[in-house]
Image (spheres, rainbow, N blue to C red):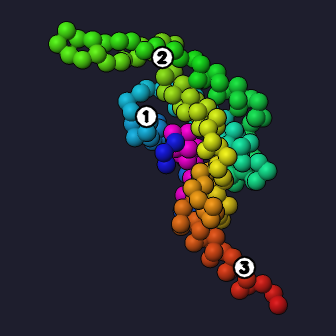
């Protein structure tokens, strides 16, 4: 996935056993996900989990009138509350560009960060940029059995987030047809 906001939303996923896994459910999982997707930025896990809920709420709002992800059906915020949370997190940190020009080198931009949680602001800004982009119109909740992911539809025939979800959906349809009473 190329979008950090989708990566954040995808930290809730099918666990392969009929349940849902949360990659951010432990401090260790949170730190690993942060290193892998954002870098060595410190942040508060509980705040990121709350932001993820707001982002998934806005994703569910974006895919309407289609159904939201099955993981979100009973866990959504009011869209205006989610929007306020994302906007507040994005604006909580000031990233001011600074010119760094050593005597023996080339000029480069570095950023002076002031304010709140830089990780939270980075994730919120990624969500804002994604939801304000044309990609939002191609956002879908995967309809495959047991899948809880959102994805960006890449071509007109794409129905599922991954080929394995398509296979699971086809097997489920076949099973239902074979076991229908005649």
Label 1, on which residue? Answer: 38
Query: Is residue 140 shown in magenta?
Result: no
The residue lying at 43 percent from left, 15 percent from top is 97
Q: Residues within 10 Å of mark 3 (few under 14, many from 20)?
A: few
- Asked whether residue 115 is in view, the answer is yes
Label 3, on which residue? Answer: 176
Is disc 2 placed on a helix, strand or loop?
Answer: strand
**In the drawing, what numbered circle is on residue 95?**
2
Comparing labels 1 and 2, the label whose residue is closer to the camera: 2
**14 or 151, nearer to the observer:** 151
Is disc 3 placed on a helix, strand or loop?
Answer: helix
Is disc 1 placed on a helix, strand or loop?
Answer: loop
Q: Which is nearer the N-term, disc 3 or disc 2?
A: 2
Q: Which is nearer the N-term, disc 1 or disc 3?
A: 1
Q: Give residue 3's position: percent from left, percent from top.
A: 52, 42
Instruction: Tell which residue pokes out farthest to the left in this image.
Output: 104
Q: Give residue 50's position: percent from left, percent from top.
A: 62, 33
Locate residue 29 relative to residue 78 in the image: left or right.
Answer: left
Query: Is residue 5 shown in magenta?
Result: yes
Vertical comparison of 107 with 37: above or below? above
Q: Which residues are magenta?
A: 4-15
Q: Which is nearer the N-term, disc 1 or disc 2?
A: 1
Q: Residues within 10 Å of mark 1 (few under 14, many from 20)?
A: some
Q: Give residue 166's position: percent from left, percent from top.
A: 59, 68
**138 or 174, nearer to the observer:** 138
Locate residue 17 relative to residue 132 in the image: left or right.
Answer: left
The residue lying at 65 percent from left, 24 percent from top is 87
Q: Quarter-wise, where is residue 175 in the image?
A: bottom right
Alpha-carbon distance for marks 1 and 2? 16 Å
Alpha-carbon distance for marks 3 and 2? 54 Å
Alpha-carbon distance for marks 1 and 3? 43 Å
């Amino acid at each position: 996935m190329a979008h950090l906001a989708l990566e954040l939303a995808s930290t809730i996923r099918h666990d392969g056993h009929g349940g849902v896994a949360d990659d951010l459910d432990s401090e260790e999982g949170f730190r690993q996900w942060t290193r892998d997707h954002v870098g060595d930025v410190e942040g508060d896990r509980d705040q990121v989990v709350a932001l993820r809920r707001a982002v998934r709420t806005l994703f569910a709002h974006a895919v309407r009138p289609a159904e939201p992800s099955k993981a979100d059906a009973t866990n959504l915020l009011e869209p205006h509350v989610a929007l306020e949370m994302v906007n507040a997190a994005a604006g909580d940190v000031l990233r001011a560009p600074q010119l760094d020009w050593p005597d023996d080198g080339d000029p480069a931009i570095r950023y002076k960060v002031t304010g709140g949680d830089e990780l939270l602001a980075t994730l919120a800004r990624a969500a804002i940029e994604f939801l304000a982009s044309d990609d939002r119109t191609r956002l879908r909740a995967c309809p495959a059995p047991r899948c809880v992911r959102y994805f960006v539809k890449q071509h007109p025939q794409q129905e599922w987030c991954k080929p394995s979800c398509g296979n699971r959906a086809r097997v489920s349809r076949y099973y239902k047809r074979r076991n229908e009473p005649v």
